[in-house]
Image (cartoon, rainbow, N blue to C red):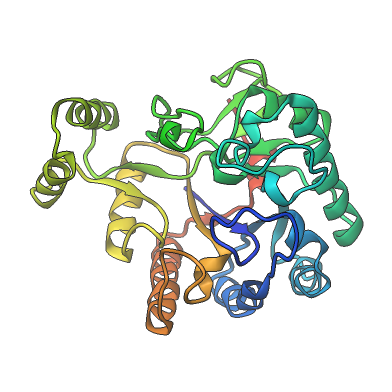
């Protein structure tokens, strides 16, 4: 089993779509976070936005980690603060996949160039901001030399946010070609989804049950809560933003038993600083957040799972 840790490394402002004045104070918190990773010999993949890639202080922090060989730097595109700015800012245009393909490419090219110039490496790993991924985005990635994406969220539909529907996907990595986001032998790109699944053994049955509840029950949150407490339907995201340590470990165990070859734990860098994300509101919650991460790392090390960055995983992936 390979453990991949992907961090959406971004500006402080959560869901505030602004082109300029994007502060990146949370990046200071990567220093103690990286010390934690180093203690467990884990190499994270920091997927960085344009403000992070162009701020001298955030560049210095990340470059110091990179030059020690302790991380990978990839790209994370927030369309609202990645030039050129040729569309109105809205929830719809906050999804990269909703922009004209030419504008998608221009933004991705600028982000790619900023990372290459400031870090002296060409990024090959990517995640779309707000999960706004599509075939058009994939085509742009391929043209720019990217090799691996981590934007498809299994069992999740972002239509309510004017985004894509990934609810038919399971958390298996797969090669694909840009025109079809489906498994294809010898596809030019690799998809490594965030680890989202169920504590039950039949992921597809649980997903169908979830969809049935969504369609049939008006008070579906009550039904979900009841089934969760009864241990009949427990949907889990391998993220300290969405689950406690024990639940994440249970999902890891389930995915291992089902034969999944890797785990992809995800979170956002603003969650490292209290008050910058919906997931961490107080200094006490900051401490608990890091403790949840450390518990998963301890478990992985105890099981002798191997740490891998996204590009490392892509290089060794076999169909």
The outermost residue toward the bottom is 283
Give the percent coordinates (x, y) of residue 219.
13, 40
Residue nearest the observer in this picture, 286 or 230: 286
Left or right for 26, reference 172: right
Task: Indicate the quadrant containing the C terminus: top left, top right, bottom left or bottom right.
Answer: top right
Please, is residue 256 above or below residue 30 in the view?
above
Inspect this view and state whether residue 290 appears: yes
On the image, which quarter does residue 137 sit in?
top right
Left or right for 201, reference 116: left
Give the percent coordinates (x, y) of residue 89.
65, 44
Please, is residue 228 above or below residue 315 in the view?
below
Inspect this view and state whether residue 76 appears: no
Give the percent coordinates (x, y) of residue 289.
42, 72
Left or right for 68, reference 274: right
Give the percent coordinates (x, y) of residue 280.
42, 71
Residue nearest the observer in this picture, 167 or 249: 167
**Residue displayed at 64% across by 60% down:** 10
The outermost residue toward the front is 88
**Residue displayed at 43% across by 61% down:** 300
Q: How many marks?
A: 0
Please, is residue 68 above or below residue 156 in the view?
below
**Residue displayed at 78% across by 32% down:** 103
Please, is residue 126 above or below residue 35 in the view?
above
Left or right for 45, reference 300: right
**Residue displayed at 43% across by 28% down:** 169
């Amino acid at each position: 089993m390979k453990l991949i840790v992907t961090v959406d490394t971004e500006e402080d402002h959560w869901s505030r779509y602004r082109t300029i004045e994007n502060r990146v104070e949370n990046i200071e918190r990567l220093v103690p976070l990286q010390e934690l990773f180093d203690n467990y010999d884990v190499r994270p993949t920091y997927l960085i936005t344009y403000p992070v890639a162009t701020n001298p202080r955030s560049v210095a922090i990340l470059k110091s980690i990179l030059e020690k060989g302790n991380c990978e730097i990839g790209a994370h595109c927030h369309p609202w603060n990645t030039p050129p700015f040729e569309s109105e800012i809205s929830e719809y245009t906050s999804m990269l996949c909703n922009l004209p393909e030419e504008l998608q490419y221009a933004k991705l090219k600028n982000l790619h160039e900023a990372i290459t110039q400031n870090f002296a490496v060409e990024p090959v790993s990517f995640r779309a901001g707000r999960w706004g991924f599509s075939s058009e985005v994939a085509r742009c990635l391929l043209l720019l030399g990217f090799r691996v994406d981590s934007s498809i969220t299994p069992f999740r539909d972002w239509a309510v946010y004017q985004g894509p529907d990934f609810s038919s996907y399971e958390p298996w990595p797969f090669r694909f070609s840009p025109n079809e986001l489906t498994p294809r032998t010898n596809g030019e790109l690799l998809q490594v989804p965030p680890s989202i699944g169920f504590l039950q053994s039949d992921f597809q049955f649980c997903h169908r049950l979830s969809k049935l509840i969504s369609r049939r029950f008006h008070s579906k949150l009550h039904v979900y809560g009841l089934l969760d407490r009864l241990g009949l339907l427990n949907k889990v995201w391998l993220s300290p933003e969405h689950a406690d340590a024990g639940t994440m470990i249970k999902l890891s165990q389930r995915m291992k038993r089902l034969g999944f070859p890797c785990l992809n734990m995800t979170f956002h860098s603003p969650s490292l600083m209290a008050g910058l994300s919906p997931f961490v509101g107080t200094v006490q919650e900051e401490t608990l957040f890091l403790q949840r991460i450390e518990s998963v790392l301890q478990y992985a090390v105890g099981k002798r799972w191997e740490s891998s960055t996204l590009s490392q995983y892509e290089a060794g992936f076999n169909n």
